[in-house]
Image (cartoon, rainbow, N blue to C red):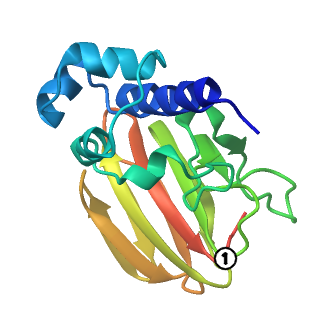
Amino acid sequence: MESTVANENTLGERLHELRTQHRYSIRGLATKAGVSASLVSDVEKGKVEPSISTLNRLAAAMGTTITYFFTPQAQPSGRVVRAADRVPFGGIADPASDTRPASGTRFELASPTDLRSIDAIYGRYEVGGWFGDEPFTHEGEEWGFVLSGRLKVIVGDEVHFLEPGDSIWFPSTVPHRMENVADTATEYIWIDIPPGR
């Protein structure tokens, strides 16, 4: 059985972690929760055991409930992929020429690597970058959202110019290709359903 001190330290560590993730100072969190800064500091250090009322105030100030401090976090319901942890991958090779139909591009998997139903891709096309010498097709659907730059997307006989904030959806069975037509790099998020890697 864990000691009271160990439980206090665990609670204090959880409080510190959540406060840090919210980027609150001790004083900032204390003000928002309506408690003293010294109390927040002492709870984080495991020096005092907060009342249920105090924990409720601290939890509410950070948009959660008191159960956050006591529930095991080993199995989160949300899975985060940090920018530094995205897995890079290349374009699709053309079997006839054994070359990659992409130039000046970078693709990184922004969704967990073991998902079978969806690929969320961060893409970056350098100036003049393109994907696909010729339009190509595959099974599924695609949705894209431009973050910066200007992306030209050819879908069948249609030509679309997407600016930051614009999005597009189309069936992947329609021939399509993309290129950067901005004088800066173009960045976007692209969703393939099912995964098209």
Q: Camera-side residue: 72 or 82?
A: 72
- In the visual, does 13 lie left or right of 140? left
- Is residue 99 shown above or below 28? below
Say which residue label 1 marks: 117
Q: Is residue 25 visible?
A: no
In the rendered image, which quarter is residue 24 located in? Answer: top left
Q: Is residue 170 above or below residue 39?
A: below
Horizontal side of residue 53 vs 91, given as left or right:
left
Q: Quadrant of the N terminus?
A: top right
**Spot occupied by residue 177 in the image (x, y as percentages of width and height):** 52, 65
Q: Amino acid at mark 1?
A: Ser
Asked whether 21 or 175 is in front, the reply is: 21
Residue 17, compared with residue 97, is above or below; it is above
User: What kind of element bears circle 1?
Assistant: loop
Check the image and report above or below for 142 versus 150: below
Residue 123 spot, x, y in % from top left: 52, 47
Q: Position of residue 127 (x, y in %)?
A: 43, 34
Q: Residue at 44% of width from left, 71% of height from top? A: 143
Name the one closer to the observer, 148 or 78. Answer: 78
Q: Residue at x 34, y 52 (%)?
A: 64
At x 39%, y 25%, the residue is: 20
